Amino acid sequence: MADLVDELRALCRAEHGAAGGSSGTLEGDVRWRAAAEIEALRQGPSGAWQPIATAPKDAGPLLLFCPGLAGNAAREIVVGTWRFDANRRSLGYWVSDVGILDPGFAETGPWIEYPELHPTRWAPLPVPPAERS
C-alpha cells in the first residue's frame, strides 16, 4: 500500500506534469499542500526533541533527555534549566529539581547540578491545561 503523501503527490504530478506545468502550479494544488502539511505533522510538533547544543540558555525550565539517567526519572526525562555561575564555571551547567537520582527515587528539591545529568536533547515544556471553574 502506497503512503498517503506519495499518493497525493502522484495525483498532482499526473495532472500537472512532473515539472508542475506553469510556475507554482504544484504548490498551489490543495493535494500538494495537504501532502506537505501531513509531512510536517509527522515530524512532530514544534516541541519535538532537539539537540542540546540548540537549547535556549535563557528560556527557563525545559524538558531534558538524559540517556542512562537512573532513578525515578520518567524515561530518562527531567525538567531542568541552564545556570551560570561565574565563580564556579565560565560556561554554565544544567541543573534539575528532580532530587536524588542514584538510590532509585526522586524527591522535589532545589535546582541542583547532579553529576548524572548529561542531557543530549531538549524540548520545551508543554502548555499547561486550562483551569476550569
Image (tube, rainbow, N blue to C red):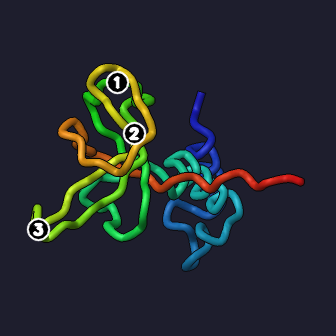
Is the residue marked by circle 2 packed among few (<14), some (14-19), or many (20+) residues within 10 Å? many
Q: Is residue 80 above or below residue 92?
A: above
Q: Residue at x 36, y 70 (%)?
A: 58
- State the residue at coordinates (35%, 51%): 111
Q: Residue at x 56, y 44 (%)?
A: 6
Q: Is residue 120 left or right of residue 14?
A: left
The residue at the far right in this view is: 133
Q: Viewer-nearest of labels 1 and 3?
A: 3
Name the image quarter holding the N terminus: top right
Q: Nearer the viewer, residue 75 or 61?
A: 61
Task: Find disc 3 in the rendering and name its residue.
Answer: 87
Q: Is residue 14 at least partly visible in the picture?
A: no
Relative horizontal placement of residue 40, taking residue 112 as reference (left or right): right
Is label 3 or label 2 in front? 3
For residue 97, above or below residue 83: above
Q: Please report whichever mark, 1 or 3, sits nearer to the chain's N-terminal start.
A: 1
Q: Amino acid at mark 2?
A: Val
Q: Quadrant of the C terminus?
A: bottom right
Q: Which residue is mark 1?
A: 71
* Badge 1 amino acid: Gly
Rendering coords of residue 96 (x, y %): 35, 47
Disc ID at residue 98 = 2
Q: Extreme front residue here?
A: 109
In the image, which disc is placed on residue 32?
Answer: none
The amino acid on which the numbered mark 3 sits, given as a three-letter code, is Asn
Residue name at image x 40 percent, y 43 percent: 109
The answer to whether residue 97 shows anywhere in this view is: yes
Check disc 2 and report its element: helix, strand or loop: loop
